[in-house]
């Protein structure tokens, strides 16, 4: 399914794409998010539990600070190159994608080597020590190869249990949860603080704040 202008404006309660700052598309069976290229003001987007295989469209969202992609079909960590040009990105949830592989440590180190500015990865706070270790223990990623793009991501089955859904609703601040039962566009989010990117020394405090 393709994310359309109508869907975006309805869920974000906005009149123009360029004004959308927060968007919730949790569990929407999406495969195509190319319209994200037309949302330069986007700051927070939830795309968890979909079938997205490329991060290229969000590379145009220069204001993006939080990206939730749990349970999608991102085939390779090479897709992270599309996020390297996002200076404000601080929160990334990429768990339960094919790209995570079978070695959690290597996966985390590789993500942090590629995106050392992250303050939280997969709902776990990032430490200065991890970022330092990632330079030595993480792998360097390059742009997705033509072969990767041609083969496409493997077919996966995502069955969301009641416990899994509850966890997502609690920890992913833009997951649909209650919003899915009512108006999908009403997120009930608090305004984002302009000082939302504290220095590294304040990360512990930042990680303990209540989710919006």
Image: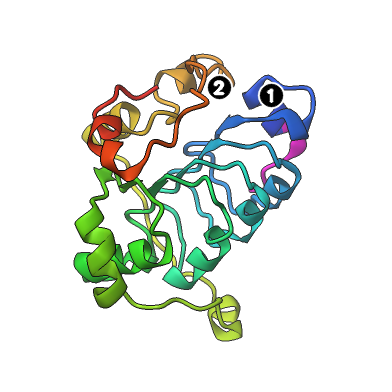
For mark 1, give the secondary structure: helix
Is 175 left or right of 7, judged from the image as shown?
A: left
Residue on which the image places disc 2: 184
- Which of the pair 140/74 is nearer the observer? 140
Pick out the residue farthest to the bottom: 147
On the image, the x and y values in percent for residue 175 come to 42, 31
On the image, the x and y values in percent for residue 1 come to 63, 48
Q: Quadrant of residue 40?
A: top right
Please tell me which of labels 2 and 1 falls first in the chain.
Answer: 1
Label count reads 2
93 shown above or below 145: above
Residue on which the image places disc 1: 10
For mark 2, give the secondary structure: loop
Residue at x 64% of width, y 25% of height: 12
Q: Quadrant of the C terminus?
A: top left
99 shown above or below 88: below
- Span colored in magenta: 1-6
Residue at x 67% of width, y 19% of height: 13
> Is any atom of residue 129 visible in this view?
yes
């Amino acid at each position: 399914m393709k994310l359309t202008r109508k869907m975006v404006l309805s869920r974000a309660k906005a009149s123009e794409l360029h004004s959308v700052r927060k968007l919730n598309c949790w569990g929407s069976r999406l495969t195509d998010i190319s319209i994200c290229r037309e949302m330069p003001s986007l700051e927070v987007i939830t795309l968890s539990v979909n079938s997205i295989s490329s991060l290229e469209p969000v590379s145009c969202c220069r204001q993006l600070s939080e990206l939730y992609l749990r349970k999608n079909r991102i085939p390779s960590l090479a897709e992270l190159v599309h996020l390297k040009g996002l200076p404000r990105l601080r929160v990334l949830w990429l768990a339960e994608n094919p790209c995570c592989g079978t070695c959690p440590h290597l996966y985390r180190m590789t993500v942090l080597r590629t995106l050392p500015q992250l303050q939280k990865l997969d709902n776990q706070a990032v430490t200065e020590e991890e970022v330092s270790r990632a330079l030595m223990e993480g792998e360097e990623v390059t742009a997705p190869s033509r072969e990767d793009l041609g083969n496409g991501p493997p077919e996966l089955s995502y069955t969301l249990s009641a416990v899994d859904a509850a966890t997502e609703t609690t920890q992913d601040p833009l997951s649909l949860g209650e919003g899915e039962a009512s108006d999908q566009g009403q997120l009930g989010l608090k305004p984002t603080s302009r000082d939302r990117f504290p220095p590294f020394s304040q990360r512990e405090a930042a990680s303990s704040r209540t989710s919006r």
